[in-house]
Image (cartoon, helix red, strand yellow):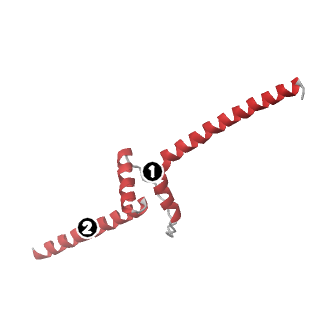
Amino acid sequence: MTGNDDLKDGEQLQNLERLRLRFAKLETSLATRRLKEADVMSYAERRRLKKTGRTEQTNIKFRPADKKKYIALADRLGLTLTQCVEYAMERLIESLKKAAKGTEEGAGRG
């Protein structure tokens, strides 16, 4: 080996060290991002894994605080947000039907 080869080896080691440091930063940022996404992943994974047969889509606007509450509720119940909305809508429809039926019965007595 000549002195020139030693210089090349030294440069290669420096390049390798720079690459290692760059990769370590990338690896750390990925790990950090995955930790931040952990809460969302549980909801998203459940949503992706379920085959529901739903083919229609709608867009609902929530206030940010309400969205967090609704997703937390869905997580606690082990349901998707869609299932929670469907359940709530069914209960609302039943409640409105009962109220309408009670009003009709009350009007028939008079």
At 37% from the left and 53% from the top, the residue drawn is: 72
Reading the image, the residue beneath label 2 is: 95
Nearest to the observer: residue 5 or residue 63: 5
Picture layout, residue 89 above or below residue 108: above
At 76% from the left and 31% from the top, the residue drawn is: 13
Left or right? Give the position of 63 relative to 107.
right
At 35% from the left and 49% from the top, the residue drawn is: 66
Picture layout, residue 46 above or below residue 98: above
Q: Quadrant of residue 28?
A: top right
Residue 35 in the image: x percent, y percent?
A: 49, 46
Residue 20 in the image: x percent, y percent?
A: 68, 36
Q: Residue type at mark 2?
A: Ser
Q: In which quadrant of the rendered image does the C terminus lie?
A: bottom left
Q: Quadrant of residue 98?
A: bottom left
> Within 10 Å of the Cα at label 1, are there few (<14), some (14-19), or many (20+) other Cα atoms?
few
Could you say whether the residue bearing mark 1 is in a helix, strand or loop?
Answer: helix
Residue sticking out furthest to the left: 110
Q: Residue type at mark 1?
A: Asp
Reading the image, the residue beneath label 1 is: 39
Q: In which quadrant of the rendered image does the N terminus lie?
A: top right
